[in-house]
Image (cartoon, helix red, strand yellow):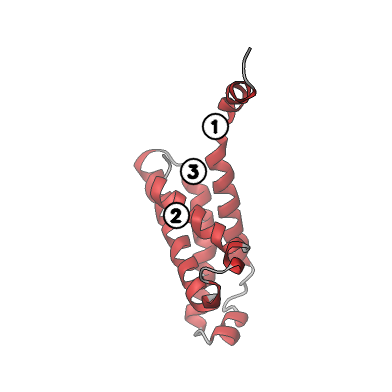
Amino acid sequence: MKSIDNILNAIMSNFYHLAPWLLRLGLGTSFVFHGLSKFPLPPQKLIDYFGFSSELASFVAISELGAGILLLLGGFLKGHVGNLVTRFAAGVIVIVMIFAFTIAHSDWFITPKLFMSEQIFLIIIGLYFFIRGNN
């Protein structure tokens, strides 16, 4: 008699290729929406709250939007180009999140608040795609 684990493995093995896509769609869509929420440019909230210049605030918004779009696009591109696009987008996401932790959430480091926020998952999934690319 097959164990439940073997049955689930047999069923779910048909869906293994979807798992990275679920992560890609979640992270890419999240960054597209984060970037779009800062439009029109320059994003006045970033200027007022962090004291960013209008150029830096616009760069952040465009970087978030662009990284999200490129991460989604990278999944459709094959070979070296897809890997590079995915890793570039993920690298931008990781950098944005490092700065977000450093500037906006510096009081969160190694606290329950960090691990109860969406931000920890954004950087972890970004690191996943930076390390794995399309592989």
Disc assigned to residue 127: 2
Disc assigned to residue 16: 1
> Compared to 41, does 8 lie above or below?
above
Q: Residues within 10 Å of mark 3 (few under 14, many from 20)?
A: some
Residue at 64% in and 69% down: 37
Q: Residues within 10 Å of mark 2 (few under 14, many from 20)?
A: some
Residue at 49% in and 41% down: 76
- In terms of secondary structure, where does tag 3 sit? loop
Whether the residues at callouts 1 and 3 have beta carbons within 8 Å, the answer is no
Disc assigned to residue 75: 3
Residue at 49% in and 43% down: 75
Residue at 39% in and 49% down: 131
Across and down, in percent, residue 107 comes to 54, 77
The C terminus sits in image quarter: top left
- In terms of secondary structure, where does tag 2 sit? helix
> Compared to 17, does 117 lie above or below?
below
Give the mark, 2 or 3, whose residue is nearer the N terminus: 3
Residue 10 falls in image quadrant = top right
Q: Nearer the viewer, residue 129 or 74?
A: 129
Q: What amino acid type is highlighted by mark number 1?
A: Tyr
Across and down, in percent, residue 16 comes to 54, 32
Give the mark, 1 or 3, whose residue is nearer the N terminus: 1
Rounded to the nearest whole Å, what is the CA distance between mark 1 and mark 3? Answer: 15 Å
Rounded to the nearest whole Å, what is the CA distance between mark 2 and mark 1? Answer: 20 Å
